[in-house]
């Protein structure tokens, strides 16, 4: 950020990106930078927050409040005049028109970088125009420390074997680590599926289809009707499963 480059930080829900955004904001303020920290809100509130952070007037000389377009123009002028940094948490919630406006800001105001924190951002408009990094899962040691601290706060006695069992549920996600201990405390059954660290098995299904097709041709050569019919049936079943998986929502369209 200090080098003047905008950046997109991508992380799962509960991965700690909001905490990171707040720490970066505080560090930049301490370093003497002019910074605006914006959380999800309406377009007008977003622009007013930026104006407030950069001491940009929101009224004209007659005392009338500036319109949305006028606020945008004033912000653009301020960003071009000197180095100012904008930080947006949960940037995937920003309205489309504002994202396109911010994309223009990135191009017109290279000395005023933008730092975006988002979960499953779409690959388009603003998000495709800035470099991105991904928050990695926390190491097992830190996850265990979080679980131990949460357990101690609730006077729960967890053995190492219990921590190891709970740790497998959370895939390095600190928020899920806290929730797993809470669920253990109140005796709830664990439900999988909150974290997004899964492998893609569609390729294996495709390989299976190709294998059965090869066996089908082999059966023709041997004149084995039973093997021919069986391989054809299994190939159809695998292909149907493969196409069904392909029709499932992509990463950006998952139900949150």
Image: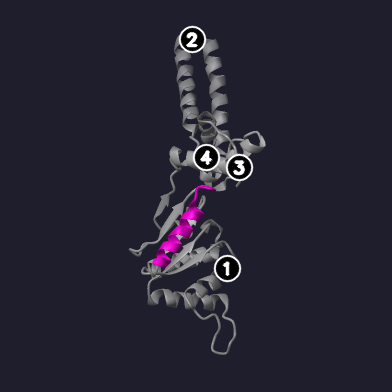
- Residue corresponding to mark 4: 148
Q: Helix or strand or loop: what does disc 4 sit on?
A: helix
Question: Closest to the observer: 161 or 203?
Answer: 161
At 57% from the left and 20% from the top, the residue drawn is: 233
Q: Residue 129: x percent and y percent?
A: 42, 59
User: Do the residues under discs 1 and 2 have CB atoms within 8 angstroms?
Assistant: no
Q: Nearer the viewer, residue 71 or 33?
A: 33
Label 1 with label 3: CB-CB less than 8 Å: no
Q: CA distance from mark 1 to mark 2?
A: 70 Å
State the separation of the CA atoms marked 1 and 4. 42 Å
Give residue 223's mark: 2
- Mark 2, Cα crowd under 10 Å, few <14 / some 14-19 / many 20+, is few
Q: Secondary structure at mark 2?
A: loop
Other residues around mark 3 within 10 Å, as few (<14) / some (14–19) / many (≥20): few
Q: Are marks 2 and 4 in contact (CB under 8 Å)?
A: no
Res 151 quadrant in image: top right
- Please check the rendered image and state whether residue 144 is part of the magenta-colored stretch, yes or no: no
- The front one of 60 and 39 is 39
Please give the residue where the numbered disc 1 appears in the rendered image: 43
Name the dominant secondary structure of the magenta segment: helix
First along the sequence among labels 3 and 2: 3
- Sequence-wise first label, 3 or 4: 4
| Residue at image coords 50%, 71% | 50
Which secondary structure lies at badge 3?
A: loop
Which residue was labeled with disc 3?
Answer: 154
Residue 7 in the image: state x and y as whole percent.
Answer: 41, 58
Q: Do the CB atoms of the residues marked 3 and 2 lie less than 8 Å apart?
A: no
Relative image position of residue 228 (x, y in whole percent) = 52, 15
Name above or below for residue 102 compared with residue 202: below
């Amino acid at each position: 950020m200090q080098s003047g480059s905008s950046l997109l930080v991508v992380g799962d829900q509960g991965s700690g990106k909001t905490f990171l955004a707040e720490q970066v904001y505080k560090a930049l303020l301490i370093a003497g930078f002019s910074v605006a920290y914006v959380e999800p809100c309406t377009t007008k509130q977003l622009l007013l927050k930026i104006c407030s952070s950069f001491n940009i007037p929101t009224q004209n000389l007659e005392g009338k409040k500036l319109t949305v377009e006028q606020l945008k123009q004033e912000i653009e002028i301020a960003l071009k005049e000197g180095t100012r940094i904008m930080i947006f948490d949960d940037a995937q919630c920003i309205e489309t028109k504002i994202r396109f406006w911010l994309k223009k800001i990135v191009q017109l105001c290279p000395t005023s970088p933008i730092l975006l924190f988002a979960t499953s951002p779409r690959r388009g408009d603003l998000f495709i125009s800035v470099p991105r990094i991904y928050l990695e899962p926390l190491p097992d040691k830190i996850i265990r420390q979080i679980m131990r601290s949460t357990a101690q706060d609730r006077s729960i006695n967890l053995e190492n074997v219990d921590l190891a069992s709970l740790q497998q549920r959370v895939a390095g996600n600190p928020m899920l680590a806290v929730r797993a201990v809470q669920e253990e405390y109140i005796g709830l059954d664990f439900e999988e599926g909150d974290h997004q660290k899964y492998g893609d098995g569609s390729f294996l299904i495709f390989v299976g289809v190709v294998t059965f097709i090869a066996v089908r041709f082999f059966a023709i050569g041997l004149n084995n009707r039973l093997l021919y019919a069986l391989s054809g049936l299994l190939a159809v079943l695998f292909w149907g499963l493969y196409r069904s998986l392909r029709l499932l929502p992509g990463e950006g369209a998952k139900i949150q």
